[in-house]
Amino acid sequence: RVEFLGGIPSFLGRMGSKEDEAKAAAAAAAAEAAKKKEEPPKPVDPLTHGMNELKAVMQTLDKAVSTKEGRFMSRAIRMVTTLRRLLSKAVLSKAIETYVPDSPTREQLVAFLAKVEEVEKMQIDTPAAGPPVEVKDEKSEGDGDKKESDKEREERVKKEEKERLEKEREEAAWLRKMLTVPEAETLVLLLGAIFLLDQKHVESALAVSWALIQRVLTFNRRTLDPLLSKAYFYWARCVELKGQSAQIRNELLSGYRTAVLKHDQIGQATILNLVLRNYLEFNLYEQADTLIRKTSFPEGDASNNQLARYLYYTGRVKAVQLEYTDAFRNLQQAARKAPQQSALGFRKTVYKLSVIVQLLLGEIPDRSIFSQKGMVSALRPYLHIAQAVRVGDLGAFHKAMQEHAEGFKKDKTYSLIVRMRHNVIKTGLKKINLAYSQISLADVCSKLRLESVEDTEFIVAKCILDGVIDAYINHETQTMVSKANLDVYSTSEPQMQFHKRVAFCLDMHNQAVKAMRYAENTKTEWESAEERRERLKQEEEMMNSMDEEDEF
């Protein structure tokens, strides 16, 4: 016990010294980080930065081609979004020279790029790098350290030179290999079409994208399917900007048939959305509904963006055909699957239609929908419509329609808003029915601002027949008499609301299960040949021992 108590001070002293050392190291690291933060980042040449990003995309593309894994191709396509901001005439010219072999399509793209004016880009800052590597210098070492001899220095220089030459040879071999990969050529041509479209050279972008589609169709490689779908998308966009969408409908349908025969799910999803967009642009809702019923959306490999577009187009068709419940469900799914940090224009369009469909269902949208970031001004006209429907004020409804008629027609929601007049009248009648036990039809006509008492009588009779209000009409006195209000819990309304919420939760669960990705490889496929032989040998010994036990 005495020895133990005597050792406590020394133990505590060691603990204190370790804590002091840790605090000193943390303070030194914080000071070094603050010093680095104060230093301005070094500028980088835009051409070098763009080519480095393109090389990273090409390496991912090469991995996708060699492993035949679709997720690597999807990752490469997602990286194009970042690369698109770095594109310039110089970057594309260097990319064509590096990755595209001689072909008529290459010559065509080079000719179109020559017509684009070169925009001088400012040098950009270097991206945040990882922790710096400590470089030791001879002079900074203590006098007790041995200096590097001339022989060791010469060997180190030779080793570094050998490593550099080896790296250059590997780089040259990889570039020669990429010249023979059609996916690399297709990606550069696709970047060229995107750049021309961004520079407002629609004619040139249209020619390049169509030539790219014809070029890709000459190959029979499944790894080209995602890039082909992107080429179709930008080709259709160029045609739409030129106002010639009606002329490409047959080509799109032919491309969809080809994608179905090749089991190209990404191509099916993309071209199906393009065909639906084409139909809706010309208000061909019957043809769009027929296409939706005769086809099925491939939810397996299709991206969330394509699924969100498909759900929006389907919801729009259902809304025009009076199927409001299905339309509202599809629009909710489209808003949920759309990118939440970007695609603001798409989300605005979805919420505009969703608000109208929800009002047509007899429900009032939540106020938080109209106060979302970036959507307040765009959804303000729809807020005025929702307020008029909630109160049942027909005058405010007509005023809002007249003030924002041009905007509603531009959004293609005007015809749906016209249908909402009956909902405003029904809401007003519900409020009157709750407030008055008996009221004359003339007073109802004045409160709802209807045209005549006769029209009011017919409207009230129709609402009573549909079960909107619980009342009856006294034709002798020309009054509407309300019946005693029943307890809502004695009706089937709670059961319907509960069923609706349960169905929503089950649908969300099914969507989550479909979105999960499981590993395709099992553990036995990862083992080497030696491990496999050892495993088979152990299994054989085990079977023999079991046989011997059975004989015993």
Image: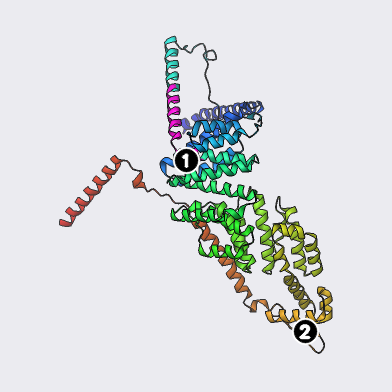
> Residue 208 occupies which quadrant of the picture?
top right
Closest to the observer, 529 or 68: 68
Q: Marks 2 and 1: which is nearer the front?
A: 1
Closest to the observer, 31 or 16: 31
Closest to the observer, 34 or 525: 525
Q: How many marks?
A: 2
Asked if residue 36 is among those painted magenta in the image, a careful observer would answer no
Closest to the observer, 420 or 6: 420
Residue range in magenta is 165-186
Look at the image and tell me in which quarter the C terminus lies. Answer: bottom left
Which structural element holds mark 1?
Answer: helix
Mark 1 = which residue? 183
- Where is residue 379 drawn, in percent x and y? 73, 56
Note whether residue 294 is visible.
Answer: yes
> Residue 325 occupies which quadrant of the picture?
bottom right
- Where is residue 525 drawn, in percent x and y? 35, 46
Of the numbered discs in the image, which one, if any, rests on residue 205? none
- Where is residue 436 drawn, in percent x and y? 80, 79
The amino acid type of the residue labelled 2 equals Val
Note whether residue 337 is visible.
Answer: no
The amino acid type of the residue labelled 1 equals Glu
Give the residue displayed 84% in from the left and 80% down from the top.
442
Instruction: State whether residue 271 is above or below residue 59.
Output: below
- Where is residue 495 drawn, in percent x and y? 60, 73
Q: Residue furthest bottom?
A: 476
Mark 2 = which residue? 481
Q: Is residue 95 left or right of residue 462?
A: left
